[in-house]
Amino acid sequence: MLRKILVLALTISFLLPGCIESNSVIGTKYDEIPLRLNFEAQTLDRAEDNGSTFELKKELESSPVLLLWVGSSCFGCHDWTNLIRESLENGSLNNSTLSIVSVHRWANLEGEDEVMRAFGEDTNDSSYTPWKIVMANEQTPALEFFSDENTGYNVYEAYGNPGTPTLQLIGDNGIKMWQSKNYWANTTILQEIWDTASKL
């Protein structure tokens, strides 16, 4: 009988530390997604991307940021990209008001080559993107803005699992200030984004 109790006690002592460790790892996820967020991710590493790595907090140092969530086969994403680019080129929008960043949304479905062909090259069959293109994925962690602590959420979850296209205006403190999920590009919405950004 004593032997059975001893074997049971040893078995429990070996299992217990694993349970405690497992719970402590799970406990690192924030209870709620913070309002102020930062993230870092790779870019397509073109000249337009200003380097191979993007950090939202660094981008926000100069102006608010418009995140345009895109997919290579999303017609609305091409429509928004073309309208924004043409509006900047013809001067109807001021390019110093905010920084535009396209964020790839579907890393599990599309690769870098598809995104490069769709948005990265200045060709007739491409919706050329003369601003940064960020290649986020499900392993890209969302960080708390001030501490850069991993929130336990990936960047997709932290920004509300955006469909494509989604436009999100981020203020200089990392807070999402405005959002549109309008599928087709619209000059009225675009002007509203710029007006809002100019007041931040």
Image (cartoon, rainbow, N blue to C red):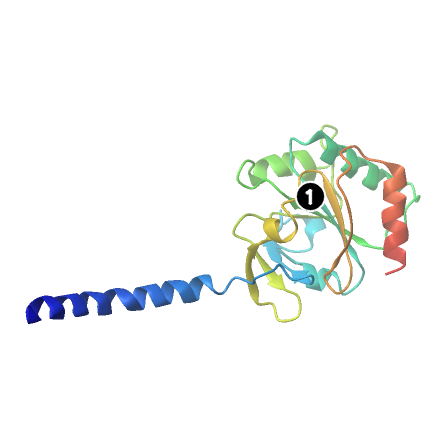
Choose top left, top right, bottom left or bottom right for residue 12.
bottom left
Farthest top residue? 125
Quadrant of the drawing holding the N terminus: bottom left
Residue 132, x across and y down, in percent: 71, 49
Residue 77 visible to an observer of this rendering: yes
Q: Position of residue 140 (x, y in %)?
A: 56, 54
**Residue 182 found in image quarter:** top right
Residue topped by disc 1: 69
In the image, 101: left or right of 187?
A: left
Q: Looking at this rendering, what residue extends furthest in the right direction?
A: 92
In screen coordinates, is 105 left or right of 192?
left
Residue at left offset 68%, top offset 59%:
56
Q: Residue at x 76, y 34 (%)?
A: 183
Which element is circle 1 on? Answer: strand
* Pick the front one: 132 or 36: 36
Look at the picture and state if 18 lies above or below 78: below
* Location of residue 186 in the rendering, given as x and y in whole percent from the top left corner: 85, 36
Is residue 88 visible in this depiction of the protein?
A: no
Of the 4 image quadrants, the one containing the C terminus is bottom right
Instruction: Give the class, few, some or many, for how many residues have Cα within 10 Å of label 1's Cα (few <14, many ≥20).
Output: many
On screen, residue 145 above or below 54: below
Q: Amino acid at mark 1?
A: Trp
